[in-house]
Amino acid sequence: MNLPFDNSLFLIPATSGLIFMLAGFVMLKFPPKKINSLYGYRTSSSMKNQERWNFSQKYSALEMIKLAVILSLTSVIGIIYSPEGELGIFLGLGLMILMVVVLLIRVEKAIKNKFGNE
């Protein structure tokens, strides 16, 4: 079986899933210690205090790894289905954007559940 390296519906989820997984492992192994605006999971709710910051860094890294695995597995769709033209690009990017949105929603919900509306 030949892998469809010219199919965007395979390439985008596979490569972005691997990149997200690597980023999640790096954030898990080397989380930012202090609140900053350069590195880490940075939202207004995660930057309110140090306790929230520490929680959101670990939680977001774990969620990023989970969602990266799911995103990588969706690349199987690109092996089964090869859309014509730019449709593959739109579908691949759509899957990637969906995973980012799901990551934000899940981490923000976890922060809210743990800390409330402090």
Image (cartoon, rainbow, N blue to C red):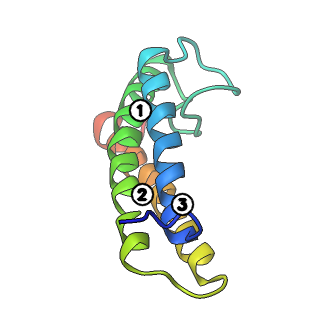
- Using the rendered view, name the quadrant where residue 8 is placed: bottom right
Residue 26's disc number: none
Q: Depth check: give the residue in front, 32 or 19.
A: 19
Q: CA distance from mark 2 to mark 1?
A: 13 Å
User: Eyeballing the image, is 56 above or below 103?
Assistant: above
Please give the residue where the numbered disc 2 appears in the rendered image: 102
Q: CA distance from mark 3 to mark 1?
A: 23 Å
Which part of the image, by quadrant, shows the N terminus?
A: bottom left
Which mark is first along the chain, 1 or 3?
Answer: 3
Tell me which residue sits at (51%, 32%) in the image.
23
Instruction: Identify the amino acid type marked 2.
Output: Val
- Label 3 sits on a secondary structure element that is helix
Expressed as whole percent of the image width and height from the top left, the position of residue 59 reads 36, 32
Which part of the image, by quadrant, shows the C terminus?
A: top left
Q: Depth check: give the residue in front, 61 or 35.
A: 61
Q: Is residue 109 visible?
A: no
Expressed as whole percent of the image width and height from the top left, the position of residue 114 reads 29, 35
Q: Residue furthest left?
A: 113
Instruction: Identify the amino acid type marked 3.
Output: Leu
Please give the residue where the numbered disc 3 appears in the rendered image: 11
The answer to whether marks 3 and 2 mark residues whose Cβ atoms lie closer than 8 Å is: no
Q: Is residue 98 visible?
A: yes
- Label 1 sits on a secondary structure element that is helix
Expressed as whole percent of the image width and height from the top left, the position of residue 55 reads 38, 25
Tell me which residue sits at (70%, 26%) in the image.
38
- Label 2 sits on a secondary structure element that is helix
Of badges 3 and 1, nearer the viewer stands: 3
Tell me the crowding category of disc 1: few under 14, some 14 to 19, or many 20 or more residues within 10 angstroms, Cα based: many
Please give the residue where the numbered disc 1 appears in the rendered image: 61
Which mark is first along the chain, 1 or 2?
Answer: 1
Q: Depth check: give the residue in front, 88 or 112.
A: 88
Expressed as whole percent of the image width and height from the top left, the position of residue 101 reads 49, 58
